Amino acid sequence: MFFEPLAGFRHVTVSDRRTAVDFADAMKVLVDDLYPSADQITVVLDNLNTHTKASLYKSFSPREAKRIADRLIFEFTPKRGSWLNMAESEFSVLSRQCLNRRIADQETLTAEIKAWYEERNKKTVVSVWQFKVDDARIKLAHLYPIIKNTI
């Protein structure tokens, strides 16, 4: 799922699995189709093993992989903080509004999800989520490394 929270834009691709090739194909769509005029695109990702620029080189020629990689800036959520990824919140909405029933096949699933995200995009459903650094240090203390000074 691609989700631009303040613009109220999302795009979802359905695939059989979550492979490096699937990820690379999605990044190509992001760069070439969704944001073709952007010089740089910041992508917030969880720490799935396929979420690397190396996946681009598994899927495309070195020249094409570099072209795509040069336009992408990857930022990763903390390992135990995937809920910080705004797309996770949007997945929750997708699950409640669209995936709350049995869907017979991938073709129907793809059509249903596309109808869902196109409707949300049409309504420009935004997500304004703010978390100040001071709040993070208190609420997320367990995610920060503990450094013991032995000197």
Image (cartoon, grey):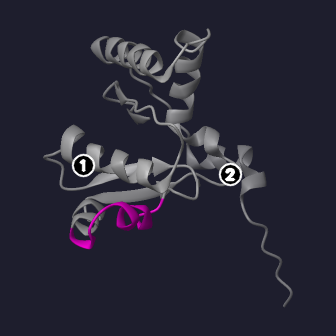
Q: Quadrant of the N terminus?
A: top left
The three-letter code of the residue at mark 2 reads Arg
Horizontal and vertical percent for residue 54? Answer: 43, 67
For image coordinates 34% across by 48% down, the residue present is: 25
Q: Is residue 85 above or below residue 50?
A: above
Q: Could you tell me what secondary structure mostly forms the magenta stretch?
A: helix
Mark 1 sits on what residue? 31
Q: Taking 104 as reference, is 63 left or right? A: left
Give the magenta part as a residue range: 52-63
Mark 2 sits on what residue? 137
Which secondary structure, mark 1? helix
Can you tell which quarter of the image residue 127 is in?
Answer: top left
Q: Taking 127 as reference, is 76 left or right? A: right
Asked if the magenta segment contains residue 56, the reply would be: yes
Instruction: Bin the neighbour count of mark 2 within 10 Å (Cα to Cα): few under 14, some 14-19, many 20 and up.
Output: few
The three-letter code of the residue at mark 1 reads Val
Q: Nearer the viewer, residue 138 or 26?
A: 26
Q: Taking 109 as reference, is 78 left or right? A: right
Instruction: Bin the neighbour count of mark 1 within 10 Å (Cα to Cα): few under 14, some 14-19, many 20 and up.
Output: many
Asked if the magenta segment contains residue 141, the reply would be: no
For image coordinates 51% across by 37% down, the residue present is: 16
Q: Is residue 150 above or below residue 128?
A: below
